Image (cartoon, helix red, strand yellow):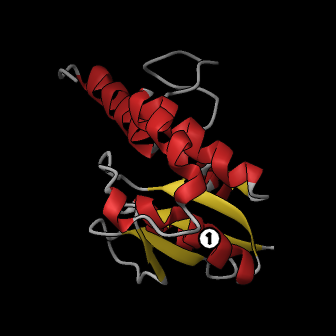
Amino acid sequence: MTLALIAGRGRLPAEVAAAQDVPPLVCGYEGTPPEGLDVDLTFRLETLGTLLVQLGEKGVTRVCFCGGIDRPQLDPSKLDAETMALVPLFQKALAAGDNGALQILKEIFEQTGFEVLGADELLPDLIANQGFCPRHGRTRRCAGMRYAERRCWRVWRRSISGRRA
């Protein structure tokens, strides 16, 4: 099973890639390169159908969306033949808000036969573990990435020293 990262800007794609035993195929959105990671395939919204075909040809079975991407504008003049059938879904996605658009994009990949994984599944220490958290109590899980865990411990250390968080 080969993994592809649908990578946006930021450090997260490089961190996810570094945590894998086998280097993943890195697909970067045009104009939004990930930090510290070479891109194997570059795509646009208008060429997503071609990207799906290329991933299948390369034996990719799992994908992970990671990193930031600004909401793209659909340019009909740049549509390729493989992507034409996806246009109604794109229009629906672009009108659905950020979460709705991501959900539709996820469904497109799943309907094409790819298993979509979260970055937290590939990088286990991305999310703070459940357990004692000085800020939130003994059983509450901190929301967010490792930053939340560091923030909670910083608050706790400051609270025992009498300083403000």
Q: Is residue 80 above or below residue 110?
A: below
| Residue depicted at x 42% and y 19% | 135
Residue 10 in view here: no
- Using residue 79 as the reference point, say whether residue 131 is left or right of it: right
Kindly give the residue lying farthest to the top in the view shown: 137
- Using residue 8 as the reference point, say whether residue 140 is left or right of it: right
Kindly give the residue lying farthest to the left in the view shown: 163
Between 41 and 146, the residue placed more toward the observer is: 41
Residue 69 in view here: yes
- Using residue 69 as the reference point, say whether residue 21 is left or right of it: right
Across and down, in percent, residue 58 comes to 70, 83
| Residue depicted at x 22% and y 24% | 165
Across and down, in percent, residue 123 comes to 60, 57
| Residue designated by label 1 | 4
| Residue depicted at x 75% and y 59% | 114
Pick the quarter of the image with the N terminus. bottom right
